[in-house]
Amino acid sequence: MTEPLTDAKTQIDETVKANTVVLFMKGTKSMPQCGFSSRVAGVLNYMGVDYQDVNVLADDAVRQGIKDYSDWPTIPQLYVNGEFVGGCDIITEMTLSGELDKLFDVSDVGYEKDAADKIRDANG
Amino acid sequence: MPMQPEEIEDLIRETFPDAQITITDLAGDGNHYAAEVIDASFAGKNRVQQQRAVYAALKGKMDGPAGDLHALALTTKAPD
């Protein structure tokens, strides 16, 4: 493994451990640059979750490094308490099923339950 | 390089010979697909573990700009 990728892995590991909720995405939470990233960021924004966004388009080493870190080939990737939770499809399913609420409950992550219910009502 | 739905199914089928596999071309461009994979081996695994196994079966077809597949919406579950 080359030096930059090792650095990226260390950087990713530190980011994931220093923040309760981290979303690796294309673009930023206020300006997503891919529909899949936009969907997950949109859910978190709407639910009022305080999270750290990492724009993988800003750094090629992180863009590749995050895929190696999680053994997961796609972006976005959501981490809660240092654990990889899933990509766009899994987060969408978990939002609609209420599993994401439960994960936030047990992880002590603040969010607006009413907003989560509204998402489910609109997509139920 | 766009992929045909049969190619995706064949790749998944190599790893999951008895799975129920449904491929849908979402955009009609050979580049945005949905795949539903129902397989007994998924029992007791969480979604991340299930979908990692499907990605592994696709052998790098999803890998970034050089990959053949830009988007594959995955749904995985064990049979009821």
Image (tube, rainbow, N blue to C red):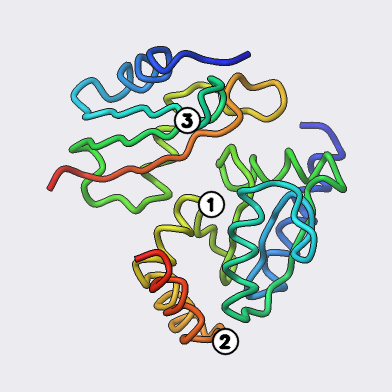
A101 or B44: which is nearer to us?
A: A101
Alpha-carbon span between mark 2 and mark 1:
21 Å
Find disc 2 in the rendering and name its residue: A110
Compared with residue A31, is residue A65 higher up or lower down, i.e. above or below?
A: above
Q: Residues within 10 Å of mark 1 (few under 14, many from 20)?
A: many
The amino acid type of the residue labelled 3 equals Tyr
Q: Position of residue B37 (x, y in %)?
A: 30, 35
* Quadrant in the picture for residue A31: bottom right
The amino acid type of the residue labelled 2 equals Gly
Compared with residue B27, is residue A102 higher up or lower down, i.e. above or below?
A: below
Find disc 1 in the rendering and name its residue: A88
Dot 2: element: loop
Of marks 2 and 1, which one's residue comes earlier in the chain? 1
Dot 3: element: strand
Please give the name of the residue rendered at 63% of the width and 28% of the height, measured from the top-left corner: B63
In the rendered view, does B49 fall on the left or right side of B40?
A: right
The amino acid type of the residue labelled 1 equals Cys
Q: Chain of mark 1?
A: A
Picture disc at residue B42: none
A18 or B23: which is nearer to us?
A: B23
Q: Are marks 2 and 1 on the same chain?
A: yes
